[in-house]
Image (cartoon, grey):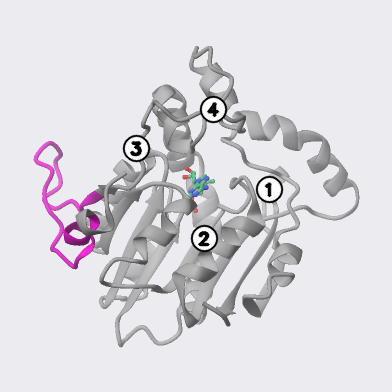
C-alpha cells in the first residue's frame, strides 16, 4: 500500500490531467490506495460470490480490492449496470437530490473538500455543477476501478474538481492523514446498503470528517409491512446479483444509535417506480466528535 506521502501530490488541488486515450480534453487524476497484494490470508466475505461468478475457485478473499482484481468482468458489468440502468432513477430523484446536497453542505462559497464514499460512476457530478459549487473539491472513493473510470469522465464533463481514489471505506483514515487533513463533509448515496458493516463504516466516516462537519446520506432502506417482508426474503439474492447490496437495512436506526453523529435532518420517502428499493431515507448529520 502506498504511503501517505505518496498520496499527497495526487490529492493536492492539481488541475485535471488528460489520460490521452479518450475523446474528452481533461480527465481528473486517479489514486490507488489499496491494491491486491496476493499474499494476504483469506477470510470469507460477500464478494467471494462475485469471484465465483468470474470462474475463480477461491471462496474467500481478504479485501474488496483483492476480489475485484480476480473478477474484472463482474466489476465492469456492475459499473455499466449502475451507469446505464439507473438513469431513469437519477432523473426522477434529481430535484430532491439537489435540495438535499444544497441543504446538507450549507455555505460552500468558502470552499469545501468533500469525500464521496462509494462514488460509483458519480451520478451526482452534474448536481454539484448545477449548484455552481466552483470552490468544492470532491475526492471520490470506490473499490471498483470501472466505476471510477466513468466517474472521472462525468466529473470532467461537469467540470467538477475531482480526485478518484480506488479503495474502500477502510482507506478513509489514510486519506485524512494527508496534509489536507479531514474532510468538510462525507457524502454517501446508495452505499451503506453495500458495505459489510454499517456501524464500522459510520465510525470511519465520523473519524474522517472535521468536528462540526457533515455526513450526508441518501440510502434505500427496509420498508414496512409486506414490502419489508418481501425485501427480507429477496435480500440474500440481491446481495449476490448486486455486489453485496442489502434490501432490508434499517440504516437510519443504525445512524441514530451512533454517538459520534447528531442527525440534523432525516426524511423517509418512496421513489416512484423503484420497486424493491423504493423506500428511501435522506438527510444529514453533524459530526460531534473526532
Ligand atoms: C449502488 S452503488 C452507488 C454508487 C453511487 N454512489 C450512486 O449514487 O450511484 C454502491 C457503490 O459503493 C461501492 N462500495 C461497496 N462497498 C464499499 C466500501 N466498503 N467502501 C466504499 N465503497 C464501497 C461500490 O463499488 C459501488 O460503486
Q: Which residue is mark 3?
A: 35
Residue drawn at the location 37% of the way across and 66% of the way down = 176
- Indicate whether residue 278 is drawn in magenta: no
Give whichever of discs 3 and 2 has the lower sequence position. 3
Q: Secondary structure at mark 4?
A: loop
Q: Which residue is mark 2?
A: 188
- Tell me whether the residue at label 1 lies in contact with that at label 2, contact meaning CB atoms closer than 8 angstroms: no
Q: Does the magenta stretch mainly form a helix, a strand or a loop?
A: loop
Q: Secondary structure at mark 1?
A: helix
Q: How many marks?
A: 4
* Few, some or many residues within 10 Å of mark 4 (<14, 14–19, 20+): some
Residue drawn at the location 62% of the way across and 33% of the way down = 46
Q: CA distance from mark 1 to mark 4?
A: 32 Å
Asked if residue 287 shows in the view, the reply is yes
- Determine whether 208 is above or below 198 in the image: below
- Determine whether 246 is above or below 213 in the image: above
Give whichever of discs 3 and 4 has the lower sequence position. 3
Q: Which residue is mark 1?
A: 277
Q: Secondary structure at mark 3?
A: loop
Q: CA distance from mark 1 to mark 3?
A: 32 Å
The image's mark for residue 269 is none
Give whichever of discs 1 and 4 has the lower sequence position. 4
Residue drawn at the location 52% of the way across and 48% of the way down = 88
The magenta stretch is 7-30
Q: State the image coordinates of residue 257 (x, y, percent, origin top left).
A: 74, 70
Label 2, ligand 1: CB separation under 8 Å: yes
Q: Name the quadrant containing residue 72.
A: top left
Q: Which residue is mark 4?
A: 42
Q: CA distance from mark 2 to mark 4?
A: 28 Å
Amino acid at each position: 500500500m502506498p504511503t501517505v506521502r505518496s498520496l499527497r501530490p495526487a490529492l493536492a488541488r492539481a488541475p485535471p490531467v488528460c489520460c490521452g486515450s479518450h475523446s474528452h480534453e481533461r480527465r481528473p487524476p486517479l489514486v490507488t490506495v489499496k491494491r491486491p497484494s496476493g499474499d494476504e490470508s483469506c477470510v470469507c466475505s460477500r464478494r467471494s460470490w462475485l469471484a465465483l461468478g468470474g470462474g475463480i475457485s477461491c471462496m474467500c478473499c481478504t479485501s474488496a480490492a483483492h476480489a475485484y482484481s480476480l473478477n474484472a468482468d463482474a466489476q465492469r458489468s456492475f459499473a455499466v449496470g449502475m451507469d446505464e440502468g439507473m438513469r431513469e432513477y437519477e432523473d426522477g430523484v434529481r430535484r430532491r437530490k439537489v435540495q438535499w446536497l444544497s441543504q446538507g453542505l450549507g455555505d460552500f462559497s468558502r470552499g469545501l473538500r468533500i469525500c464521496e464514499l462509494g462514488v460509483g460512476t458519480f451520478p451526482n457530478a452534474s448536481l454539484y455543477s448545477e449548484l455552481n459549487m466552483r470552490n468544492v473539491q470532491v475526492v471520490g472513493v470506490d473499490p471498483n476501478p470501472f466505476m471510477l473510470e466513468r466517474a472521472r469522465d462525468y466529473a470532467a464533463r461537469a467540470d467538477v474538481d475531482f480526485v478518484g481514489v480506488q479503495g474502500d471505506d477502510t482507506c478513509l483514515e489514510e486519506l485524512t492523514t494527508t496534509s489536507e487533513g479531514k474532510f468538510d463533509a462525507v457524502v454517501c448515496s446508495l452505499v451503506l446498503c453495500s458495505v459489510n458493516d454499517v456501524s464500522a463504516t459510520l465510525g470511519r466516516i465520523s473519524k474522517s470528517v472535521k468536528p462540526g462537519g457533515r455526513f450526508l446520506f441518501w440510502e434505500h432502506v427496509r420498508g414496512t409491512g409486506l414490502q419489508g417482508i418481501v425485501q427480507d426474503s429477496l435480500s440474500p439474492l440481491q446481495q449476490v446479483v448486486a455486489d453485496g447490496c442489502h434490501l432490508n437495512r434499517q440504516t437510519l436506526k443504525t445512524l441514530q444509535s451512533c454517538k459520534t453523529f447528531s442527525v440534523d435532518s432525516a426524511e423517509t420517502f418512496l421513489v416512484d417506480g423503484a420497486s424493491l428499493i423504493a423506500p428511501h431515507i435522506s438527510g444529514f448529520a453533524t459530526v460531534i466528535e473526532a
